[in-house]
Image (cartoon, rainbow, N blue to C red):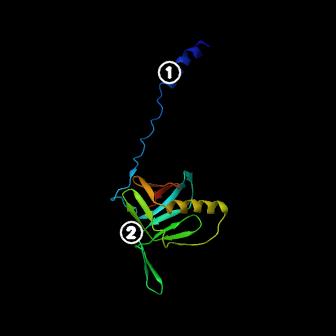
Amino acid sequence: MTRLVLLIPFALTACAGTRPAVPPPAPEVRPVVAQDNLQGRWTIAAVNGRTVDGPWILFGGEGLGTATDTGDSIVIESPQPPTRAYLGCNDLRLNGWVRNGDKLVLGTDHAMKSERGCEPATMALEVQVHAIIGKTMTMELTPPDRLRLINEIGTLDLLRENN
């Protein structure tokens, strides 16, 4: 019994001597600058902080498209390659994109959206995403592959896909 009592202080000292794990440094979050390449496909990983699976945005050529009235029809010309998105149920062909500093505007004028119907939860998510991308967004980049888009409607967290 005395042996057990003698071992307890050593056991307590050993436990007290272990250091807690040091968390890794927080990643660098910074505004997007002109040198940052946004082109390519980005998975929308979270909408307003809620993890999602499926939606994505493909940033094509930078610039906004134009619409020309020929008298007989309206001709839409978009930067190439095209900018597209999948909102969880429907596809969206955007009319380009442009940035001004850390602000991003997607070309929603003359955009074309498919009209498939999906389950209510998927459609609700799609409505949220569409509302956010329809307004000017502030961009925050966590190099090399995370992009956060923020405006008064909400937040999208994007992950760059390997192209």
Q: How dense is the environment of label 1, judged by Cα within 10 Å: few (below 14), some, or many (20 and up)? A: few
| Badge 1 amino acid | Thr
Q: Residue at x 45, y 86 (%)?
A: 71
* Location of mark 2 (residue): 63
Residue 25, position in %: x, y? Answer: 41, 41
In the rendered view, would you say 71 is above or below 22? Answer: below
| Residue 163 showing in the rendered view | no
Which residue ends up furthest to the bottom in the rendered image? 72
| Residue 120 showing in the rendered view | yes
Q: Residue at x 48, y 32 (%)?
A: 20
Point out the image quarter for the N terminus: top right
In the rendered view, would you say 118 is above or below 155? Answer: below
- 106, 23: nearer the viewer: 106
In the rendered view, would you say 2 is above or below 32? Answer: above
* Location of mark 1 (residue): 13
Residue 91, position in %: x, y? Answer: 55, 70
